[in-house]
Image (cartoon, helix red, strand yellow):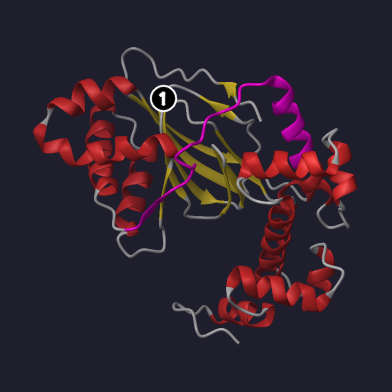
Amino acid sequence: MKPSFEKISIGEERSLLVKKFTCSYFDALYHFHPEYELTYIVRGHGQRFVGDSVEDFKEGDLVLLGSNLAHFWRSDASYYQAPDPSGSEAIVIHFSEKLVDPVLGMIPEFSVIQSLWRRAPQGVAFASDNEAFGTIRELLLSLSTTTRPAEQILLFLRLLTELATFPETRMLASEGYVPRLNEAETERMRRILDYTLQHFREPIGLPDIAKEAHLSEAAFCRYFRQRTQKPYLSYLNELRVGHARQLLIASSMSVGQIALDSGFQNLSHFHRLFRRFTGYSPLRYRQIYQLGAKTSPSAS
């Protein structure tokens, strides 16, 4: 899908822009910009698209994006069905390239941060369940409440140092990722994603989604795999299991009801896929959250 260009107005007198967004759901278009970006999800869950990476996101998700790396976050379908004005929240920091190379590159004490710039072109995810993440979370929250420019810069430099030495990170987009700047592909992928998010609770066959994309079934399978690095059925099942996980945590529905509401017509198939994606049976997954367990017990 073709990303659209987004103009970020940091201003000539500033090096970074810190914003805190509170909204019903995340639904920004697939876009890119020259500025680097840090996005921290305070509340909300859904799917994150970075380059050719498609993954679930949830509270605590933190990602660093390099210059012109295409991205967007899309909330789970449940957020659209019963919108809550404060149901989703994120802290987004945009910072200019003029801060990255000309300034920090000349200060030997900040040489450790250079490792971030080498990884940023693919996007970097930081594991929020690591015990070292507490310091990063505090710095992000402080940055979002501080309005004095000089204090923001000092906090931001400390944040970058913590991120550069963070013990658990991983790359998102593949090394060979190259954005495809074709308007027709943008609209085609948007139709695919919108149709899937609207209908994942219903049976979706390859003829249905291929027709939505205006492709033959074989051409659609190639198209989707090339652009997301996974088969469409895997993407659909991940979306359904993600929805089921939320219902297991937030509702009192039976496992059978949740399976049907998540688009699974066969209960044993639901159990098998749920265990494959989470490592637990649906019932055990619910028990873990109900008990508020701090460590994950063995799967049952």
Residue, far left: 108
Q: Amino acid at mark 1?
A: Glu
> Which image quarter holds the C terminus?
bottom right
The location of residue 198, given as percent across then percent down, is 82, 47
The secondary structure type at the circle numbered 1 is loop
Does residue 177 lie above or below 83 as drawn? Answer: above
Membership of 178 in magenta stretch:
yes
Membership of 240 in magenta stretch:
no
The residue to which callout 1 is attached is 35
Which stretch appears magenta? 168-194
Does residue 21 lie above or below 76 as drawn? Answer: above
The location of residue 255, given as percent across then percent down, is 77, 77
Query: Which residue corresponds to the image point at 62% horizontal and 77% vertical from the top-left?
Result: 285
Residue, far top: 12
Q: Quadrant of residue 112?
A: top left
In the image, is 244 to the left or to the right of 163? right
In the image, is 62 to the left or to the right of 199? left
The location of residue 163, given as percent across then percent down, is 29, 47
In the image, is 272 to the left or to the right of 288? right
Query: Which residue corresponds to the image point at 28% horizontal and 43% vertical from the top-left?
Result: 159
The location of residue 86, given as percent across then percent down, is 61, 46
Query: Which residue corresponds to the image point at 77% horizontal and 47% vertical from the top-left?
Result: 197
> Which image quarter holds the N terminus?
top right
Query: Front-most of 96 and 265?
Result: 265
Residue 234 visible somewhere in the drawing? yes
Does residue 264 lie above or below 63 as drawn? Answer: below
Query: Which residue corresponds to the image point at 31% horizontal and 14% vertical from the top-left?
Result: 13
Query: Front-most of 102 and 232?
Result: 232
